[in-house]
Amino acid sequence: MPTSPAKFFAGTQSRYLAEKIVKAYGAELGKSTIIKFSDGEFQPCFEETVRGTTVFLIQSTCPPAENLLELIFMIDAAKRASAYKVVAVIPYFGFARQDRKDKPRVSIAAKAVADMLHSVGLDRIMTMDLHADQIQGFFNFPVDHVYASTLFAKYVADLHLDNMIVAAPDMGGSKRANAYSRFLKTEMAICYKTRKKENVVERITIIGEIKDKNVIILDDMIDTAGTITMAADQMMQNGARSVRVVATHPVLSGPAYERIMDSAIEEVVVTDSIPLQKECSKIKVISCAELFADVIHKVYNFESISSKFIF
């Protein structure tokens, strides 16, 4: 049984999702405020006692970087207010693309963020679809890494598409695509891409037979949408019947919305780990609130969460 009561608080960026999570959990959000100074500094403050409680802080660390800083300050405030445990619920873990040194003289930002969270006393983290699974090893405390496949697999299956094939947008996504193909009992294709520079794709080569197929492109995030739109257009030119995209985190920066609307993509399915900046007729949002509510309940009550891993 839990040894302390639980309280839930939301960061500014993720309050919309936190409200849905705590409602699904059967609780209420705690009261907190952000004091802002004229020079841009800010100070999170809990407006109720957290002494002796297990505090769940819900905040995705999506751009801008102030969202990460706000989470760090909230963790520090909770620990200094004598919280028993502090758990960060981070549906989207930012800086995860910087998980290794892929060229000289660069930082491993994902490790630096993990170290910062550890340094302020965080006890546990819950997150979803990390860009690279090995990031879990950057933390010196438990990581509950859940997968949006528990949401997406049923949605894709319920489409009842004939002649379906799943595709990875790059070589790094082949493991994810392979898992979906085995679960859905479909074939798999891979897009091999070369870049001129970051966020600029020069060329895409499709490996696999996609002619007359209904294609499902799977990814963990969509940033500028350059890769998926180029891949979708090329697939349609190569004879695909339709192209849909399933991606967990809708970062959608720069020209992403315009690219999606102008592309051959029929539908983009994402979660609400990050709020959409604007409405888009091609984008469908599936909430991850109940998934996180259930994981929080199980972890808080010392129960297994293995049922949340479809594959």
Image: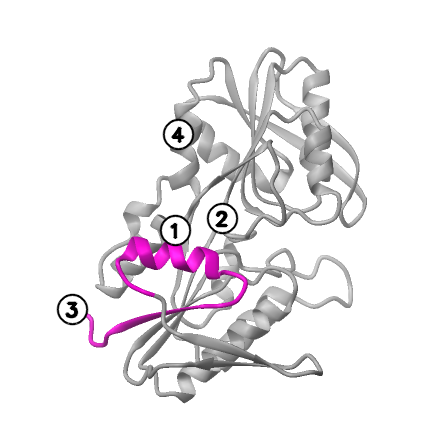
How many numbered marks have been drawn onto this rendered protein structure? 4
* Residue assigned mark 1: 289
* Residue assigned mark 3: 1
Point out the frontmost of discs 1 and 4.
1
> Does residue 266 belong to the magenta stretch?
no
Assign a secondary structure to mark 3. Answer: loop
Q: Which mark is first along the chain, 1 or 3?
A: 3
The residue positioned 70% from the left and 42% from the top of the image is 256
The residue positioned 67% from the left and 34% from the top of the image is 228
Decide: few, some or many residues near mark 3? Use Cα within 10 Å; few <14, some 14-19, many ≥20: few
Q: CA distance from mark 3 to mark 1?
A: 24 Å
Report if residue 115 is visible in the image.
Answer: no
* Residue assigned mark 2: 272
Assign a secondary structure to mark 2. Answer: loop
Q: CA distance from mark 3 to mark 4?
A: 35 Å
Q: Amino acid at mark 1?
A: Ala
Q: CA distance from mark 1 to mark 4?
A: 24 Å
Assign a secondary structure to mark 1. Answer: helix
Q: Amino acid at mark 3?
A: Met
Which portion, as a residue range, is magenta? Answer: 1-28
Decide: few, some or many residues near mark 2? Use Cα within 10 Å; few <14, some 14-19, many ≥20: many
